Image (spheres, rainbow, N blue to C red):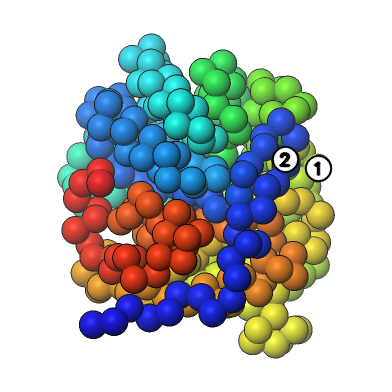
Amino acid sequence: MEKRLVSSLRTESLFKPLQLKSLSLKNRIVMAPMTRNFSPEGVPDENVASYYRRRAEAEVGLILSEGTVIDRPASRNRPAIPFFHGDDSLAGWKRVIDGVHAAGGKMGPQIWHVGAISSGATEWAPDAPFESPSAVYSPGKPHGVAMTDEDIADAIAAYGRAAGAAKRLGFDTVEIHGAHGYLIDQFFWAGTNVRNDRFGGATLKQRVTFAAEVIKSVRAAVGEDFPVILRISQWKLQDYNARLAETPDAMRDWLGPLVEAGADALHCSQRRFWDAEFPDLDGKDGLNFAGWAKKLTGAVTISVGSVGLSGDFLNAFKGERSRPASLDNLIQRLERNEFDLIAVGRALLNDARWAIKIRDGDHADLKDFTSAAFRDLR
C-alpha cells in the first residue's frame, strides 16, 4: 500500500536551531521520554547506550531519556526501570551521554518518582510501601502510605541530587517528571492530595508547593545557566479525562509559580497535539496545551502527542497499528510560534532515523508502528 504524503508543506521550521540558556539545539525535534524497562537492577547497559546513540546519529535535536528514578525506597514500580543514583547506575548513564555527545547529540535525563502508582504489567513491588501525598492511588482509592514531612524533605533533596549528578556527568539539561498521575502530579491533583499542611490546600495554586520546592532544589544543584524542563499534563494514567485547570486563569495559577521557581521549559503532555486546550475560547483549532502554557507564562514550551502517526498512543498498547500521518498541522503551529519544540514518541521509538527521513522528504521509507517496538531496543 502506498504511504500517505506526510507533509505538503516545507519542513524547515522543524529544523531551525534554538538556544535555551546553555543548551544549543540544531533543530526543534525532541525524543520524548518513554519507559523502556531494559535496565536490570537499575543499571543502563550498552544496549541502552546504543539505543540513544542511534537517535543522536540520526539528527534528533534533543533526546530526553526514559524515566529514571530518584533515590527513594519506592520510587519505581518495575524492576528494570533505571536509577539515577548509585555508582553503577551513574556509570551506565555516563556511557549513555558520552555516546550521545560523540554522535553530535544533546540529551537530558528525565528524573522521576512513581508515587502511588503500581504497575499493572508485573506483580513486582519495591521493598518499601508506595508513597504519595495522601496514601491514595486515585480519588477514593487507598494505596501505600502518606508521606511524612521527613519523607517529603528527603524526596525534594533526592531530586536535587539527581539533577546535580546529571550536570556532573555531562548531560545538557534535565527534565523533572511532573505529569501523568505520578508523584509530583499527585500533589497537584485535588483527588490525590487531601493534606492540610503547606503541601496541600483547597486550591491548585496551593498544591503546587511540592513541585515548586523540587524545582528550587534542582535549580540550586545545577546553577542558573543549566536549563531545567518540567513535564506536566492534565490527563492521568488513573483518569484520562482528568483536568487540573479548566480555565486559563487556573492554568496561570498552576504554571506561573513553577516557572517562577526555576522551570525554564514546560513539556506539555497531551494525547493529540492538535487538540485545542480551551476550544470554548478559541475554537476547535485553537491553541493546544503547550500554546496556552507559553502564552500564560512566557516559558519555552514543548508540545507532544501522536506526532507523525495515526492513532492514539494509548491504543498502541492494545495492539493497534499506526501509520505515517500528516505533519501539516504541526508545521503550521510551529510557524506561528504556538510552541517552541515538538516531542516525538512512537515514531522515534520505532525508527531511529525518523528525523532524517522527514528532513530529506523520504516519506516512502517511513515505517508503520506496531506494538512489537515495545519489546526491544531497536
Residue 203 placement (x, y as % from top left):
72, 58
The kind of residue tagged 1 is Glu
Q: Is residue 167 above or below residue 195?
A: above
Q: Is residue 98 above or below residue 125?
A: above
Q: Quadrant of residue 255?
A: bottom right
Q: Residue at x 22, y 29 (%)?
A: 40
- Left or right of 377, for residue 56: right
Give the labeled residue for mark 1: 260
Q: CA distance from mark 1 to mark 2?
A: 16 Å
Q: Residue at x 29, y 82 (%)?
A: 2
Label 1 secondary element: helix
The kind of residue tagged 2 is Leu
Q: Is residue 130 above or below residue 330?
A: above
Give the labeled residue for mark 2: 20
- Left or right of 200, for residue 326: left
In this view of the protein, can residue 33 be seen by the observer? yes
Residue 122 placement (x, y as % from top left):
19, 47
Residue 3 placement (x, y as % from top left):
33, 78
In this view of the protein, can residue 316 be seen by the observer? no
Residue 27 placement (x, y as % from top left):
61, 49
Q: Residue at x 72, y 40 (%)?
A: 20
